[in-house]
Amino acid sequence: MLSTYTNPVYSYSRSKDQQSGTVTHHKVVIIGGGPAGLSMAIDLAKQGVESVILDDNNTVSVGSRAICFAKRTLEIMNRYGCVERMVSKGITWKKGKVFFGDEKVYEFDLLPEKHHKFPAFINLQQYYFEEYLVDVIETLSEVDLRWKNNVQVVDAQTDINLLTVDTPDGTYQISCDYLIVADGANSPIRTKLGLESKGQVFQDRFLIADVVMKADFPTERWFWFEPPFHPEQSALLHRQADNVWRIDLQLGWDADPEWEKREENIRPRIEAMLGPDKHFDLEWASVYTFQCRKMDDFIHKRVIFVGDAAHQVSPFGARGANGAVQSVENLAWKLCRVLNQTASPLLLRTYNDERQFAAEENILNSTRATDFITPKSTMSKVLRNATLELAKNYPFARPLINSGRLSTPCTYRNSTLNTPDRDTFNNVLIPGSPILDAPVNKHEVASWLLDWVGNHFVLMVAEGSTEQDKLLAELAKITDLEVLLISHDQQSANLRGITQLTDTQGLLHQRYDLSEGTAYLFRPDQVITARWRQPAINDITEAMQRALGHQLDEAQ
């Protein structure tokens, strides 16, 4: 197999903790240097919290693994500072096509609306994603990333965690207030603590093959049901960076994984798909059986699970890595404010509440996709194939086709952190919704709303009467709150502590149904937590206190 990518090798070095000879204490320790663990450390650092990452390896992932990064993930990476490299290297796409046999059933557009900073999806190999995150971490003094540090023992106590860590120089011990576990789907730490991840194992096997080739296929997601080159099964084709193409081939439950991974057995399958004249090199291959499962509780004492260690889905729909990053952004701001004692300690329980809801949503979509792709009975297959036939000519049947409902961000509509609406709005951006981007200007320089929201609470206020100045002056004094004043025309006034943005195209007003004085309060993870037509200062401070979980103390 020929590889287009050379894995970086990161050096192991003795930490100060090993040299001290005592048990050093840290606020946060993260186990696992994959997408979730690396993202967690960056998110904490962006909000002023130091952390230690312990990884038992010394490189990034082997093989492309997760390749589809959704718009919401790119928006989060914009906050982390590595999105430009991702978009520049990755393959941008938003269209997909579904085939039944050798006929196209229909095609779809994942971002039909224009004027967003980022595309619906990019395809980028996971090893690039991890490498870019490591590069960001190397610029952050708040993060201590330790390679070849393998956690052997976790003593999870009520108010502290004690870790025994093995290294090339022997073992040492450290302690921490909070332990973040991001060590993957098979999570050794979860096992050591006697905890379970429960769910369903799907009795089917799939071959993933990354092939290097120059092809004139359009940059789209192509999915086949029962194609002539792979009868009675399914197939998927995606383009990645470096002229690498991801091919997924359904094999069936009886397939022998070791036999199927041999290059001499993979090549005939791919040649049947691409045609005899298409030259390619095989870069990486794997055979997998997937599961949809999650832990009943992502928090155990002061140990918090994120990413695949907490919840696992099938690859259909690109919900694994995207869901992991969204879990990280949900947890990070809450943990930061619990540590700096501006939030109730009970705020951390809402991480479990909100991300359990998101995990259930992802598992439901993933399970439905799997059931459609791999019918479990003769009747199910007849119904599926009838749906595919109808979809060729009848639009009503197309939404019923499920080749993987692609990742979209979760809306925390029932979160206890939301302030319920008291006013009427003519849009779908209810409290609990993630940010919806739009173009803006600052001093006639083009920008995006996304660039001004995150890491702190942000209040977006539509310009109103001159009486609004008094409210804005009071808001500027609130700790952990940044204020955006939105106008139709360029502002000339200079309000201290207020960022003034111009909605020159009117899209921000349209998407958020803004009228004079309308305000939206965003959480530090860019989620709407409250909105009003004409808020008073008390409305805003009470909504912030609610979003910080102080009402949970009163409920106890």
Image: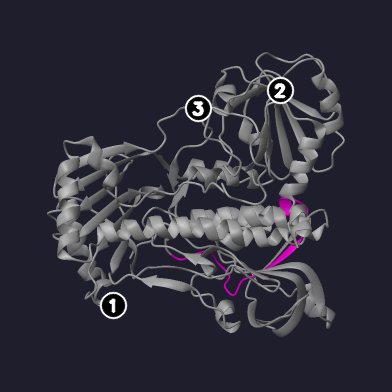
The tag on residue 258 is 1
Q: Is residue 257 above or below residue 226?
A: below
State left or right for residue 318 relative to residue 56.
left
Going 58% across and 50% down the picture, which residue do you hit?
A: 414
Q: What's the distance in space between the residues labelled 3 and 2, CA to CA?
A: 24 Å
Q: Residue 96's x, y, as percent?
A: 31, 42
Q: Looking at the rendered structure, which numbered label has been put on residue 115?
A: 3
Helix, strand or loop at label 1? It is helix
Q: Is residue 487 visible?
A: yes
Query: Can you give x and y, in whole percent of width and height, for residue 171 in the image?
Result: 70, 85
Q: Classify residue 229 by image quadrant.
A: bottom left
Q: Where does the image place residue 189, in percent across and percent down from the top left?
A: 59, 78
User: How busy is the neighbourhood of tag 3: few (under 14 within 10 Å), some, or many (20 plus)?
Assistant: few
On the image, the x and y values in percent for residue 328 come to: 61, 57
The quarter of the picture where residue 219 lies is top left
Indicate which label's residue lies in the foreground, 3 or 2. 2
**Closer to viewer: mark 1 or mark 2:** 2
Q: Nearer the viewer, residue 28 or 393?
A: 393
Mark 2 crowd level (few <14, some 14–19, many ≥20, 10 Å Cα): some
Q: Residue at the spot x=56%, y=46% of the render?
A: 413
- Foreground mark, 1 or 3, reads 3
Colour convention of the picture: one colour
CA distance for labels 1 and 3: 47 Å
What residue is rendered at 78% in x and 57% in y? 554
Looking at the rendered structure, the kind of residue marked 3 is: His
**Marker disc for residue 517:** 2
Residue 382, quarter of the rendered image = bottom left
Q: CA distance from mark 1 to mark 2?
A: 64 Å
In the rendered structure, which segment of residues is drawn in magenta?
44-62
Q: Are marks 3 and 2 in contact (CB under 8 Å)?
A: no
